[in-house]
Image (cartoon, coloured by chain):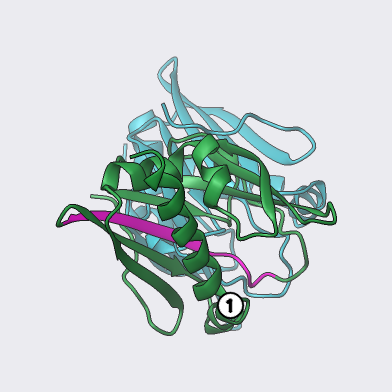
Chain colours: A cyan, B green
């Protein structure tokens, strides 16, 4: 059994939602690049490229673009994959388990996302548990709008997948 | 097959040794805390505590002490374990896949160690491949004495395990 850390309120953030979207579709939305590009980023930004190498040590890479054409690259590494149940990835590493060069000298904004998907009635209980190294990092992520950002993105996921059902 | 990054000369460091120590003993020295404490740190420093949770996501924690009593804690997270063959861990994360609060604001000194152990004649070919995010981080690790430090430590491992054979 792989060790995943418990929820630490002083270090972590949590977004939890119960939606009518079937679990297999929530999973597909998180793991298929063509679907992920449709919901991952709140407008007016858009995702212009997305790579998913769905295996432990595989890379997760996105490029988001602003209406003005500014591009921001994101990268992470998958750590644990339990199909349709759990997906753990971190921004501390990139593909191949290589450490991730952080875009700024700010060491704090690094997280591991422990995403879990449970069947509930005919839908899904989605739980995004974000782990940080420090309380300062947690606060910074919260102040950057974690709840709104991840919440809006997940609303988009539900809308996009309504078209796939 | 788990994805591990290839060797990138501009980003990585390598220590490779062929020794007569049997592979199972080199593996034990890397994974049993009581043994690890005997070789992991070059004198006059010593390892005064060591925790090994040998599973993906499990923590690896050490405390080293100087002759003056200064203590330095190290922490990492195991990513991949193939008994007696391969051990991959990173200082970018701690136990439970949680990001590791780096002791200074220097983001650069983070690495992933891909250790491999192959049987050769009656002994072992040991390969320590250290992956960094940037050329600067690689240089810094080299300048800190990676080759001497990891080399001396491995010499100690061989000496310690000679007593276990």
Q: Is residue B80 magenta?
A: no
Q: Main secondary structure of the magenta part?
A: strand
User: Dot 1: what SS?
Assistant: helix
Q: Please, is residue B43 above or below residue B145 in the view?
A: above
Residue A34: name its quadrant.
Answer: bottom left
**Observer-nearest of B148 and A44:** B148
Residue B110, position in %: x, y? Answer: 59, 65
Q: Nearer the viewer, residue B64 or A74?
A: B64
- Residue displayed at 56% across by 32% down: A127
Residue A155 visible in the current orientation: no
Query: In the depicted view, which residue is nearer to us: B114 or A102?
Result: B114
Q: Which residues are magenta?
A: B107-120
Q: Is residue A107 visible?
A: yes
Residue B43 at what x, y percent from top left? 65, 59
The total number of labels drawn is 1
Residue at left 31%, top 56%?
B116
Q: Residue at x 45, y 61 (%)?
A: B155
Indicate left or right for B46 with A116 as reference: right
| Mark 1 burial class by Cα count in 10 Å: few <14, some 14-19, many 20+ | many
Locate residue B106, reporting x and y percent.
72, 71
Tell me if B14 is positioned left or right of B97 in this view.
Answer: left
Which residue occupies 72% across, 74% down?
Answer: A105
The C terminus of chain B: image quadrant: top left
Task: Give the quadrant of residue B154.
Answer: bottom left
Query: Pointer 1 indicates a residue of which chain?
Result: B
Say which residue label 1 marks: B137
């Amino acid at each position: 059994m792989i060790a995943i850390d418990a929820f630490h309120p002083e270090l972590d953030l949590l977004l939890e939602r119960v939606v009518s979207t079937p679990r297999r579709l929530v999973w597909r939305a998180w793991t298929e690049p063509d679907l992920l590009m449709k919901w991952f980023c709140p407008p007016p930004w858009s995702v212009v490229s997305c790579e998913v190498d769905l295996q432990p040590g595989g890379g997760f890479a996105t490029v988001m673009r602003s209406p003005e054409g500014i591009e921001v690259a994101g990268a992470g590494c998958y750590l644990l994959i339990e199909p349709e149940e759990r997906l753990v990835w971190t921004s501390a590493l990139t593909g191949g388990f290589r450490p991730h060069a952080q875009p700024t000298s700010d060491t704090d904004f690094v997280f591991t996302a422990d995403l879990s998907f449970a069947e509930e009635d005919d839908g899904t209980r989605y739980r995004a548990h974000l782990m940080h190294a420090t309380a300062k990092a947690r606060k910074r992520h919260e102040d950057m709008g974690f709840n709104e950002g991840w919440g809006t993105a997940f609303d988009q996921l539900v809308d996009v997948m309504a078209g796939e059902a």
